Structures are given as structure tokens and as C-alpha cells.
Amino acid sequence: MTTVLEAELLVHLDQQINSARQLLKLVLAQGGAIRERDTEAVLARLADIQSEMVRRNGLEQERTSLLQRAGVALGMPATNVTLERLCSLITPGAASAAMQRSAELRGLLAEIAREHGINRALMRQELTFLSHLTRLIGQEAEPGYSPPNGARPNAAPAPSTYRALDLQA
């Protein structure tokens, strides 16, 4: 059981790391597309990210299965199995490799979360700017803006009391 569990754990962590690297690559590419305002590339990267997330869902199911088997071996529920507890079931060399891979995976996931947060902020900024332009083109009032004297936003502007050239003699 130990060698099987050991091999499955290390292979699983390698698959998780490879998936996380691919996801980070896609999130970074999406950020570049957002900055370049390349709508088609943004949407293509979004589709790629969704495909990778489907793959990651499968990896999470494998992780759950691995934790359940470890829980049985440890005599505890899978929800209580930690990497440290799981490492008590495998050789010290494999345990060290598993801890290193787990740390690498956590670092990749933190970087993905950070870059995704940046992408979300960039998209929000772009959409806010687009909304502003749309209101300007449509001559709609900005939200929270009320013109002076109750003027309607689409009404002709009141004549200015200042004259640039006074042609009257």
C-alpha cells in the first residue's frame, strides 16, 4: 500500500503542478490581451482557462480519492487527512519530495490568484471606461449627476452669457 500510495501522491502532485503552470500561463496571456484591448484573444483565453478548470476539477476528484484512501489507512475521515499525516504513510524521501511539490503548488496557486485579481481589476477598468464612453455618445447623464436648474441632459445647452467676439456695435 505504501509504495502505491507514495507513487500516486507524487504523480498527483506533478499533475497538479503542471495544470497550475498551464493555468498561470493562460491567465498571464489573458492579462496581456486585456492590456492590448484584444477582445478576441481575451475571449479565447477565457475559453482555454475554462477548459483547464474542467481538467483541474478532475484532478480534485483524484485528490479526494487519494485522501479517502489515506484516511482509511490512518483510521480517520478524509477531511482530517493533512499532507503531514499522509507523509507518515510513505518513505521519508517521498515525503520530502511531496512537501517540496506541495510548496511549489501553493506558490503557483497564489500567483494565479494574484494575476487573476489583476485581470479582474483591468477588465473592470476597461468596462467602466466603455460605459463612460457609451454615456457620452448617447448624451446620457452620468449616474449621480443632476444638471443645474433641473435641465434635461438631452436638452439644448442654455446660451452662454459670455461672448467670445462681440460683433454688435
Image (tube, rainbow, N blue to C red):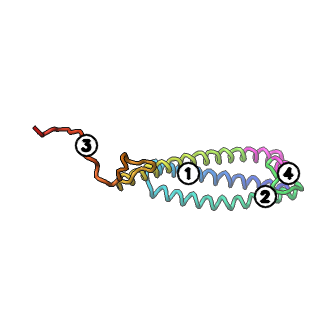
Q: Residue at x 63, y 62 (%)?
A: 54
Which image quadrant: the C terminus?
top left
Q: CA distance from mark 1 to mark 3?
A: 52 Å
x%, y% of residue 86? 82, 51
Q: Provide the residue designation for mark 2.
A: 66
Q: Is residue 36 visible?
A: no
Of circles 4 and 3, which is in front? 3
Kind of residue sitting beneath label 1: Val
For the residues labelled 4 and 1, the Cα–Cα distance comes to 36 Å
Q: Residues within 10 Å of mark 3 (few under 14, many from 20)?
A: few
Q: Position of residue 124 (x, y in %)?
A: 50, 50
User: Mark 1, residues whose alpha carbon is within 10 Å: few (<14), some, or many (≥20)?
Assistant: many
Mark yes or no: residue 34 visible.
Answer: yes
Q: CA distance from mark 4 to mark 3?
A: 84 Å
- Whole-angstrom CA distance, mark 2 to mark 1, is 28 Å
What label sits on residue 80 in the rendered view?
none
**Numbered mark located on residue 89 in the image:** 4
- Report the side of 103 relative to 53 (left or right): right
The residue to which callout 3 is attached is 160
- Mark 4, secondary structure of its residue: loop
Query: Between residues 168 and 91, which one lies in front from this camera angle?
Result: 168
Amino acid type at image mark 4 = Leu
- Which stretch appears magenta? 84-100
